[in-house]
Image (cartoon, grey):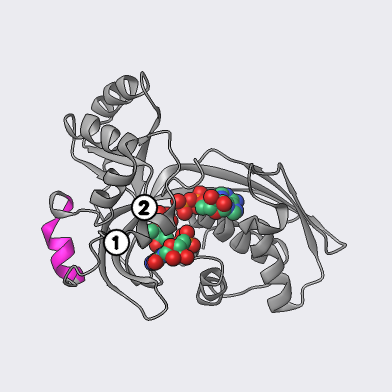
Amino acid sequence: MSDATMTLPAPAKLNRLLLITGRRPDGYHELQTLFQFLDHGDTLHLGRRGDGEIRLTPELPDVAPEDNLIVRAARLLQAETGCRLGAELHLDKRLPMGGGLGGGSSDAATALLGLDRLWQLGLSLAHLADLGLRLGADVPVFVRGHAAWGEGVGERLIPVDLDTPWFVVIHPGVAVSTPAVFGAVELTRDTPPITMARALQGGASSWRNDCEATVRALYPEVAEAIDWLSERAPTMLTGTGACVFARLDDEAEADRLLARARERWQAFKARGLNRSPLHVALDR
Ligand SMILES: C[C@@](CO)(OP(=O)(O)O)[C@H](O)COP(=O)(O)OP(=O)(O)OC[C@H]1O[C@@H](n2ccc(N)nc2=O)[C@H](O)[C@@H]1O
Ligand SMILES: Nc1ncnc2c1ncn2[C@@H]1O[C@H](COP(=O)(O)OP(=O)(O)O)[C@@H](O)[C@H]1O
């Protein structure tokens, strides 16, 4: 990799557990979650520019260039450090937007770490995670780069090692509105908090997503995908959806399930990762 251009992964995440334990005075919900990365995601190509301009191709549908989290991450880094360099960025988008896979947040984290390297800024991961939090609650875990127990809105992170099965991830073909889910009257928002030790002890078979009942009620397409998949393997919703994932111990089984899922939906297979491929690529 030359120091003037780089190609870096922006992996997806799954919420292997998602509990809603309360609501803050500002309306945001207090969560307890287990984040894990997948070996599947977007790819960001970065090149250095000497003139301070930030250029990103291609444009994403329904996202104004200035709102793209990659551009916002680049500008935030310039503002924070006074760096006068710019960047030529190209995104190969593979992750469905608004799918609960954290694609936009992961893109932002890859831009922060990639530009820190390209511009030779030398910021710490703690500093970059603080900047990331200003862009979204899911950005810090991608910056930190390790599977984690998350609390608060997901920004208080403790690295953990989870089981690393194969997953078949289905996109049910609808866009879920995160504000609509968090705003739903019937959402469970009073789950008693548990300790991280208890969550880990319980293991994957005890994990659940408190958004599931609400998302099922609002989006029958998601309910259908969960019902179909859970007849075949242990299944959960990630984030506020729309994506749902099944857990399999064996790759051949995952391949068979994937082939059947693809007869009806967009779907992919991926392995759970406790270390982000972004950090592997950057050796951070
Ligand atoms: C639920 C999670 C779990 O990983 O994932 P996704 O499904 O988005 O991937 C995240 O915490 C999502 O965080 P983030 O991505 O920052 O949420 P946004 O889309 O910006 O939030 C949209 C709106 O949802 C509500 N919201 C969001 C997060 C939260 N902890 N409490 C909330 O009440 C707020 O009204 C907010 O304005
Ligand atoms: N680079 C980006 N990739 C995806 N979405 C982005 C990006 N920049 C801004 N967004 C906005 O963020 C929203 C959430 O995207 P995403 O992270 O893919 O989903 P989720 O938060 O459900 O996991 C999108 O609907 C889009 O409006």
**Viewed as shown, does residue 93 lie left or right of 99?**
right
**Viewed as shown, does residue 190 lie left or right of 274?**
left
Camera-side residue: 268 or 60?
60
Residue 63 lies, in percent from the top left, at 64, 49
Question: Seen from this angle, which residue lies furthest right?
Answer: 51
Visible in this render: residue 74?
Answer: yes
**Could you tell me if the residues under marks 2 and 1 are in contact, i.e. CB atoms within 8 Å?**
no
Residue 146 lies, in percent from the top left, at 39, 61
User: Assess mark 2: CB under 8 A from ligand 1?
Assistant: yes
Quote the CA–CA distance across marks 2 and 1.
15 Å
**Viewed as shown, does residue 259 lie left or right of 174?**
left
**Viewed as shown, does residue 161 lie left or right of 74?**
left
Residue 235 lies, in percent from the top left, at 22, 40
Circle 1 sits in a helix, a strand or a loop, which is it? Answer: loop
* Residue 185, numbered label: 1
Camera-side residue: 111 or 184?
184
Query: Is-magenta flag for residue 201?
Result: yes
Among the 4 quarters of the image, the one containing residue 33: bottom left
Question: Seen from this angle, which residue lies furthest front?
Answer: 185
- The residue at the point 65 percent across, 66 percent down is 116
- The residue at the point 43 percent across, 33 percent down is 173
Camera-side residue: 274 or 179?
179
- The residue at the point 37 percent across, 37 percent down is 270
Camera-side residue: 218 or 36?
218
State the residue position of label 2.
240
Tell me which amino acid carries mark 2: Thr
Magenta residues, start to end:
196-204
